[in-house]
Amino acid sequence: MDSTAMIIELAQSGAPIDMVLFADTGSEKADTYAFIPVFRRWMDAHDIPSEIVQYEPRNFKHWPPYDSLGTNMLTNGTLPSKAFGRGSCSLKWKVAPQDGWTARWPPAVRCWAEGGRVVKLIGYDCSGADQRRYAHAEGYADPRYDYRYPLRELGWSRGDCIDRIARAGLPVPPKSSCFFCPAMRPNEVDALSKDELRTIVLMEARAKPRLRTVEGLWRKPVIGRRGAIPRPGTMTAYIRDRGLLPPSEVDRIVSDAPLALVAFQAAQADKPVEQRMSMARWLDMFNSGQAGR
């Protein structure tokens, strides 16, 4: 959302934008995927080039092939690193593919050959969450890049970004994240599709035997003091309590699906990689089977 507002404001003010990159984790929210072609058409109309980049796993060892952050987590029986207070999932699935693409982009190659730096525009606003992200990133040095934060230069909040997108005549997209991101708020979980909710329940159930320091994607419960929104430590408990999925379906997924997934992985282990069914295909079958009950 913030980056969208930043691009619109820069374009309308006449500031040059050489390229817009969107790093697709393969597990973005459905509303984000719906918005991407809409906004790319807007950028095309304003002569702003754009590319979608994605991390491409290559070494699957004895695992079924996976092609997204979500199927990566299901394969390894774990949760995104953010659930453990780290950020390696973003580095692997967002930063690395963008840097890899830029390293082959002729204008960047020429800039570096002439001793210059590529200017990266980061869409952090002045709201609380982005203030923390900016504080963490501030002072980071890279000999290849200079970093600018146009929304912070403008003093814009999240509300200003929403208003700017609306004034451009575009639908306001959701805050970009994976649909199981530990940073999501409860109201964002409320808006997820049934398939996304089922995958969250499966992901937490699959990872549970290995968890020691956190309860689930939300780490630990929030009681709700000092204005915090109360929520449990697992999204599964929230999904059950809010009736986002029938309790019987949640129970069935928790008890049966992790065992079925492990059995599927074991059945693929001895096959040549090119003959293994992908994790994405298994997940589609899982969701279809749950929806049909």
Image: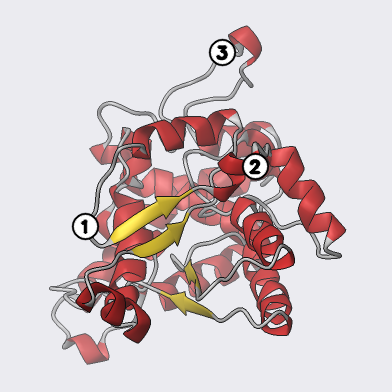
How far apart in space, not on screen, are marks 3 and 1 (Cα)? 44 Å
* Amino acid of disc 1: Pro
Residue 194 in the image: above or below residue 265: above
Q: Quadrant of the C terminus?
A: bottom right
Q: Dot 3, how many residues are within 10 Å of its Cα: few (below 14), some (14-19), or many (20+)?
A: few
Specify whether 13 is left or right of 99: right
Q: Which comes before the other along the chain, label 2 or label 1?
A: 1
* Amino acid of disc 2: Leu
Residue corresponding to mark 1: 143
Residue corresponding to mark 2: 154
Of the pair 36 and 151, the residue shown nearer to us: 151
Residue corresponding to mark 3: 223
How far apart in space, not on screen, are marks 2 and 1 (Cα)? 26 Å
Q: Quadrant of residue 134?
A: top left
- Contact, mark 3 vs mark 1 (Cβ under 8 Å): no
Mark nearest the camera among 3 and 1 is: 1
Specify whether 80 is left or right of 243: left
How far apart in space, not on screen, are marks 3 and 2 (Cα)? 35 Å
* Amino acid of disc 3: Ile
Instruction: Say which element carries label 3.
Output: loop
